[in-house]
Amino acid sequence: MKISNGARLIFWVTAIFALGLLVRAESGQRRTSLPAQKHAAPPIRILDQNGRQAVSGIPSPNGTTVDVAVGPGGGFTFDPDTINISVGDTVRWTWGSSGHSVTSGPPCVADSQYCSPNDTNCSPGSLSNVGTVYTHTFTNAGSYSYHCLSHCLLGMTGTVIVSGGCTPSGWSAGTDLPSVGARLTGVYFQANGKFYAMGGRSSDSAGSEFTHPFEYDPGANTWTTKSATYPDNHVNNMACGVLTDAGTPYIYCVGGSAVTIPDIADRVFRYDPVADVISPVAAPWPAVMGMVLPGGFTVLNNKLYILGGFDTITNGGQGTNQIWEFTPSPAAWVQKSTVLPVPLGYIPTTTIGSLIYTGGGSDITAGALTDTTNSFVYNPMANTIGTIAAIPRATGETRALNFNGLMLVMGGGRTAPNPSSEVDAYDPVANSWMVNSPVPAFVNARRNFPTDTDGTTRIWLTGGYDSTGVPTASTERFCQGGGTPTPTPTATATATATATATHTPTATPTATGTATASPTATATVTASPTATPPPGVRATPTPRARPTPAPRP
């Protein structure tokens, strides 16, 4: 019987398709670290991102093991996708289907803190088959994101929230910074669980800039002056954050000033705390033009965002309204088309979920700084910005932190009665503020100080200008006691692009021997909707005009 040409064609197409599937299946099996018939991973070797034996990863004698299913039922999920554990606990991932990985870091960006099957070669990584078991013990508090290399774009992501591991509960004194200092930038480096104070200076005199990073070990309560040397002395008021390049996390720092020198650096460098090496990044910040200090800054999806800034030259010194986005690999900057509703500098800024929030910031007119209550939410994906309920007090020259899904604005400010030690907490779901709750006020009021958090359990701060305007060395540390915290649900509201902020500075500088300025009420914000302060929260104060000496940024 003759076979038609059409039948022959169908036969060969089917055969080639089947062969392709077979080859892919065999190739996928070779790529996995374990054959399908095995049901256990090899012994776990906990190594750091440079392949060296890590001191962490030892299960606590009292620790528990929490199970997570990987791809159950052939789906592209981790079940459960978010778990709460304590320091010393172990997470055990078991593969319910093939072709998946557990890789630490934000979606599709490996940060080499941990990964299946054995915590090595996290980038580019490998996939494992059904029945694989991978475990990792968490010895530092914090919020740890992870994803599947193959299906991260399909939403196969998870989070391990680790609490505990610190005493006493509440605020307590830590070991002093190695020197009095101000205008340093604080960075928590999750890969080793340590806190870094980058840049800064010991006084407002020429030549007082620090030349090496300071490292704080929370476990030992000790500071170490590192050997790495900054590339220049323009290290005051830098914007710094942890970004990952080729699977290795670094501390990236942008811009900065030096005492008595009018120009501002546009250079970018990165610091590897593990290797203790600083290296240049060939992507200077285009916004600087020799005169702009970075404003608020935060990291989202492995990108560093800078909102606003301080133009130290134009009109005697003024705020800026630009928004910039930096990507580490390849290193590049993008100026966003959206701008802040009002120009601001020194903006407390942080990331919660997929949105960037601000609370306060400095109005800068003719070089005079005035604290404000401006509060915004910026959506980088939609590139829109809108107002939120205004922070209950005017502040600036400090940081905002994401602590269990709340934005904490930490003290700061220079307009009397500032500087402050007050901690204002913004709930993005309720669009409301709380004062000194759930985190109480710290002890010593200050501004222009380094601070950061592990996100769930601990907060560190040190240095800065005290209430008399003098740099201090005092360190304070906060411990969240009383069990595992429950993070606030991530806000999903879309930022409205019709902000209603009104910029109304009326400062008139007076040329005298000590050049002073007298600004009146600064930019105001009409929040929509307006949240009603809970009992005990004082109404938003209106900044009063006060003579302010020209700052030395």
Image: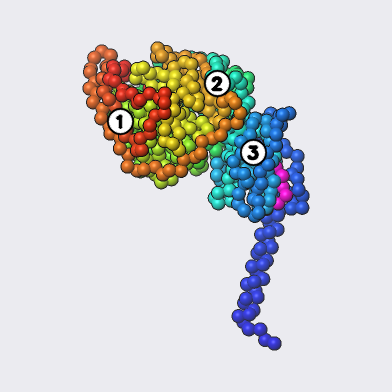
> Helix, strand or loop at disc 3?
loop
Bounds of the magenta segment: 130-134
* Mark 1 or mark 3: whose residue is earlier in sequence: 3
Disc 1/disc 3 C-alpha distance (Å): 46 Å
Q: Position of residue 174 (x, y in %)?
A: 56, 17
- Which of the 4 quarters of the picture holds residue 125? top right
Asked if residue 235 lies left or right of residue 316, the reply is: right
Q: Which residue is mark 1?
A: 524
The amino acid type found where label 1 is placed reads Thr
Query: Which label lies toward us, 2 or 1?
Result: 2
Q: Amino acid at mark 2?
A: Gly
Q: Earlier in the sequence, mark 2 or mark 3?
A: 3
Q: Residue at x 48, y 32 (%)?
A: 406
Mark 2 lies on a secondary structure that is: strand
Between the C-alphas of marks 2 and 3, the distance is 30 Å
**CA gap, disc 2 and disc 1:** 34 Å
> For residue 114, which numbered disc appears in the image?
3
Q: Position of residue 500 (x, y in %)?
A: 30, 37
**How does the figure colour the protein chain or chains?**
rainbow
